[in-house]
Amino acid sequence: MGRKPRFGAGYEIINAQRLFEKSVLEEKADFRFVALAIGASPAAPPDWAILECISLRRAVARSAARGNRNDVADILDELVAHFDLEQRNFEAAFTGQIDWASFPKPNLNGAIKKVLARLGIRRTERERSDPDSFKDIILAWNWEQQNDAAPASYFRLEGWKTTSRIDRVMKALVGDELGYPADIETLAWLAKKL
């Protein structure tokens, strides 16, 4: 039995990208290699390392803080888009000053059913009249409303506190309308690179 080859510290720094990509293929993404690449050249970090950091931040930002099903994060994002569309439709009905006092209180259960139908998922759950059938979504939404306030945000959904999810999804919706990347931070980084 032979020993595993040993390498000096320089080996991991020089081969950080290759080693990181290998760790991703093994489904054990080791961001230590990303940090090594950035640390080796902090004044001009490699593009691949910055893009991996952006990708990780996006994944973390998208995850649902509550709810153990894989689809909860996507459903919550779609709920934000649904409430945004309802708000836009209400705004479009006014030609002058918007009367926000007459804006109907958002119906979370009804919105969840509409979103699930649009996504074509959880058919048996959405057909039940019992809201406990999608309790995981309600718990996740309510938890974020109570515990995940966004730092100062331009975006607002009437009837809801602006959470980091609402801020992120609304930025993505506006970016999509304008033909920009969904992630404003990525756009800023790309503009700086150009």
Image (cartoon, rainbow, N blue to C red):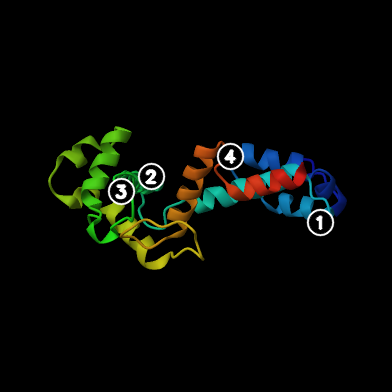
Number of residues whose C-alpha sits closer than 10 Å to that of mark 2, classed few (under 14), some (14–19) or many (20 or more) = some
Q: Position of residue 183 (x, y in %)?
A: 57, 46
Identity, as a three-letter code, of the amino acid under mark 1: Pro
Residue where numbered disc 1 is placed: 42
Identity, as a three-letter code, of the amino acid under mark 3: Phe
Q: Position of residue 122 (x, y in %)?
A: 26, 38
Instruction: Give whichever of discs 2 and 4 has the lower sequence position.
Output: 2
Residue where numbered disc 3 is placed: 94
Which mark is on residue 81? 2
The Cα atoms of the two marked residues, 2 and 3, are separated by: 21 Å
The answer to whether 104 appears left or right of 67 in the picture is: left
* Residue 116 shows up from this direction: yes
Q: Nearer the viewer, mark 1 or mark 4?
A: 4
Instruction: Give whichever of discs 2 and 3 has the lower sequence position.
Output: 2
Residue where numbered disc 4 is placed: 180
Q: Position of residue 63 (x, y in %)?
A: 46, 51
